[in-house]
Amino acid sequence: MVLLSVFVGLWVAAVGVCHAAEVRGQVVDAETGMPIEEVQVGVGEWVYRSGADGGFVAQSAAGDTLRFERFGYQPILWVLSGDDEFVRVALVADVLQVREVMVVGGLRAESRTEVAAGVSVVGGEQVHRSGAQHVQDIVPAVPNLHWAGGTARPRYFQVRGIGERSQYAGEGAPNFSVGFVVDGVDMSGLGTGALFDLQQIEVFKGPQSSAFGANALAGLINVESADPSSKAGGTVGQAFGGDGLLRAEGVINAPVGDRFALRAGYQLAASNGFRDNAYLGVDDSNRRREGLLRVKARYAASNGLLLKATLFRADGANGYDMWAPDNNRQLTTYSDRPGDDRQVTTALALRAEKALTASIDILSISTYAQTDLDYSYDGDWGNDAFWASEAYGFDPQVEGWHYDFFDRTLRQRTSISQEVRLRGGRALFGLYARALREEDDAVGYLFGGAASDLQARYDMGNIAFYGQWERALSSAWQLMLNARFEHSTIDYSGQTNGGVDDVRYDVGQWLPGGKVALNWQDRRGTTAYVAMARGYRAGGINQHPYLAAQNRPYNPEYMLNLEAGYRLSDERYRVELIAFHALRDGQQVSLSSQQTPGDPNSFFYFTANAASGRNSGVEVEGQYRLRPSLNAFASLAYLNTYVDLYGFDVAGGQRQQLGGRAAAHAPEWGLRAGWEYAHSGGFFARAAWSFVDGFYFSDSHDQRADARQLVNASMGWEQANWVVTMWASNLLDERYGVRGFYFGLEPPTYEDKLYISYGDPRQVGASVTLHF
């Protein structure tokens, strides 16, 4: 506390606070009564900003004039009288301007036009009217966002061609290139993407390590649910559709007095999973059973303290049965032991914000999350009768063994984090600490058959300090500097083959990142920026039990990203154009090496820093209001990726070359176009077409996914207290690959072949929502 007091004192001196008198107040929306943050409160040459609760503290005196300005609202002047100790100002929305979208996932809340980075925002109303049910449904709406299958629901995302495609047992620590945050809780690599009671989804593209740390080398997906409001009410809804879809949900918002509000909601959804298992004679072996409970509380104390707490529990009891040896497009499977993809997550986030002086406020963010994951699959995708058929002729009596494989991983991840930020004017300083433990208990064909069981534990710690400084160079130009220094430690212990093989290893590393950006903005809503950012992904430890010590650790990967953006908007249209060029250094790739001279069986795959690469592209998003009730939208994504050539030794003294081509899961082109209509009488309709170019399934082979086109449509009727929506996803019933493997599976020759897991086929449904 002494150090904090000294630091605050120095901070006060640094920002030059020289007024003696203070006035406190709150800025709210005149129509809704909700607080408005990031309102500029001007007093003479001084400019203050309202916080998340709309509150502000300004140095002023009787007779001073306060200027309140916020894009999307009419400005207002307030002359202070001698009795004004607390003022409550209501801003009226400016109907001649488009309400600016706020991006809340960064170090501070900003309007979308102010963010010096590529960021796409999908609002809750857009999600509701389109019939989208999960994060995977909004991926086509975001240029250069992609995802990989292999799980019941998407957990692994790629931004601008960079991102993981799996985290099987033995693949390494839970470090990710694309972060996934839900209501302030880091859920990277986990499946909690239900679009329920949603405020908005923000997709940050390009290195975000300076703001978010090690899980944001390529970008970050931030999911924000609706906050408690000052208006009592709620909703209940039900949906039904093809594939046995049934969904029920309810939300209640309850203000208690002027300072406390509570919001609680629950959603339960079930469907069959679009697969028919011919061997078991069931249509739900790939079932989806998902529940989400969320409770949020908001309290604004009389002393200016704002508290927001979020508790959620996600419970998914999904099956996993998506592969077939014949790659049939009828989505028929033959497994005799279908797998599961079960997940239970309990998470808590507490956010506390308070103004310390007229120009300094402090923010504390605390999180806790625990996840239990049960992931299993039928490794051969068949059964005895299937493999004994004439096509394959595998007879267990002749071979002496059954062609039957099954893999299962029980995983538990527990994390706790604490972050503190001090903000004074346009300067910000923060401290961040996180402790994470992940434990795996796996059985199956592991490490290429070198082990049949694995008990592994990662203990990971992160401590970071960061700062951000912004300065207005003129009325139009603004400079932003950001730096982050993070220390990452990983302590690994693992046992295989009944404890016979024991591996213990630990590493520690400093990870520096930063960003410099120059932003320009005129009074007509036109903005432009140029930025250079350095991101990082932490190194790690290879888990294979028979690796040589020198091949056990691998180093961090860094990326330098150069980016320029231009945004133009008025009451009828919005256009955004972004160009970027990224250089990857120390790229983490999968290699192999002979660990014991003279032993050809000692070739083991491991992760190492053996390549570099580059990612360049262009992203364009736009919308145009053709008529007051008709809006058109479109986007284009171009991505050019290249992984430099690299090689490694294989058995027989040969050297295999990889790279020299585009990265995996990095489609070169992406297009999207559509329209939405909303009549004043309540009728609305929406249709969207999207195209995604073909792409490589993996870095280790040259098999490709075909290009695909998807069409989604919805229509409905909305009145004051009810909404009916009918929707269709994948209207053309396209078969498109979401994950592909290339290996030998089928007896008797076991020739290498491409096996594909397909995305969801056409689904038609309807929903009814009542407001009260």
Image (cartoon, grey):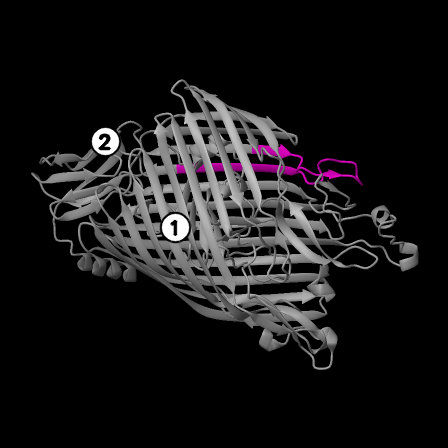
Check the image and name the residue furthest to the bottom: 597
At x 41%, y 25%, the residue is 678
View extreme (top): residue: 681
Can residue 101 be seen here? The reply is: no
602 over 253 or under it: above or below: below
Residue 205's place in the image compared with 279, above or below, is below
* C-alpha gap between disc 2 and disc 1: 32 Å
Is residue 203 in sight in this rendering?
yes
- Kind of residue sitting beneath label 2: Ala
Q: Is residue 289 magenta?
A: yes
The N terminus lies in quadrant: bottom left
Name the residue that disc number 1 marks.
118
Instruction: Indicate the secondary structure of the residue bearing disc 1.
Output: strand
Picture quarter containing residue 263?
Answer: top left
Q: Residue furthest right?
A: 397
Is 51 left, or right, of 224 in this rendering?
A: left
Segment colored magenta: 268-297
Which of the 4 image quadrants contains residue 562? Answer: bottom left
Q: Give yes or no for residue 60 being in the magenta stretch.
A: no
Residue 730: give its label: none
